Amino acid sequence: DQQVKQNSPSLSVQEGRISILNCDYTNSMFDYFLWYKKYPAEGPTFLISISSIKDKNEDGRFTVFLNKSAKHLSLHIVPSQPGDSAVYFCAASRDDKIIFGKGTRLHILP
Amino acid sequence: EADIYQTPRYLVIGTGKKITLECSQTMGHDKMYWYQQDPGMELHLIHYSYGVNSTEKGDLSSESTVSRIRTEHFPLTLESARPSHTSQYLCASSEGWYNEQFFGPGTRLTVL
């Protein structure tokens, strides 16, 4: 049973536009949420996170929104750049463990 | 910048061989983790450690074993590799309240 779901396997966005990656979770006990970015043949790298007591966190071009009532979070990237093409993993944390989603492959089109 | 290393990066071996995947970090982190990931799938936690002489099994059952004799070193061993062990193995470490984990580059294992 997947506790963290990324229902879009892939997403294509024009360069300069906004990329929106979505994630749903089922366990209301998660207290921290993270986004990781992964290039081929590399390990995931941490991108941005949000505590369950907040609804928004912003870091440069990246903003994460959390809707606890809907058990939904999203990552906004604006403006999208070619280097943003990668696989993005949503993750949720509880008791020092992280549960990952399956990832969404983001393609930034020229 | 995170300093966590994994060797080898790629490994192709025959069934029945014993292998050890190495993971080292220079950040002094107490917590270390091993994940297994198949293409297009989520990362599954197979082992973790909260410090020296501490090891626990993760959420995904694995025939591998780990040890933590030194803070910086967290090797994973498969006593007898099988084709079902073919996967990517990712090592990570973390320290701190918010559990941000730093990942190594991974080892892609193929068992023939």
Image (cartoon, rainbow, N blue to C red):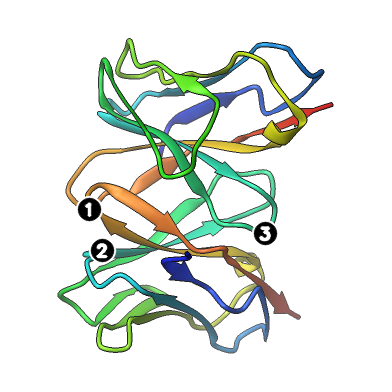
Task: Please state if B37 lies on the left or on the right of A59 as rendered.
Answer: right
Q: Chain of mark 2?
A: A
Q: CA distance from mark 2 to mark 3?
A: 24 Å
**Quadrant in the picture for residue A99:** bottom left
Residue B45 drawn above or below residue A26: above
Q: Are marks 2 and 3 on the same chain?
A: no
Residue B12 spot, x, y in % from top left: 79, 24
Which residue is pictured at 82% across the width and 18% down the height? B14
> Mark 1 near mark 3, Cβ–Cβ under 8 Å?
no
Image disc number at residue B98? 1
Judged from the image, the secondary structure of the residue bearing numbered disc 1 is: loop
Task: Report which residue position mark 2 lands on.
Answer: A32
Residue B105 visible? The answer is no
Q: Chain of mark 1?
A: B
Residue A107 spot, x, y in % from top left: 70, 74
Image disc number at residue A64? none
Foreground of the two, B32 or B28: B32
Q: Earlier in the sequence, mark 1 or mark 3?
A: 3
Residue A79 spot, x, y in % from top left: 53, 83
Residue B4 spot, x, y in % from top left: 45, 30
> Mark 2 near mark 1, Cβ–Cβ under 8 Å?
yes
Residue B30 drawn above or below residue A74: above
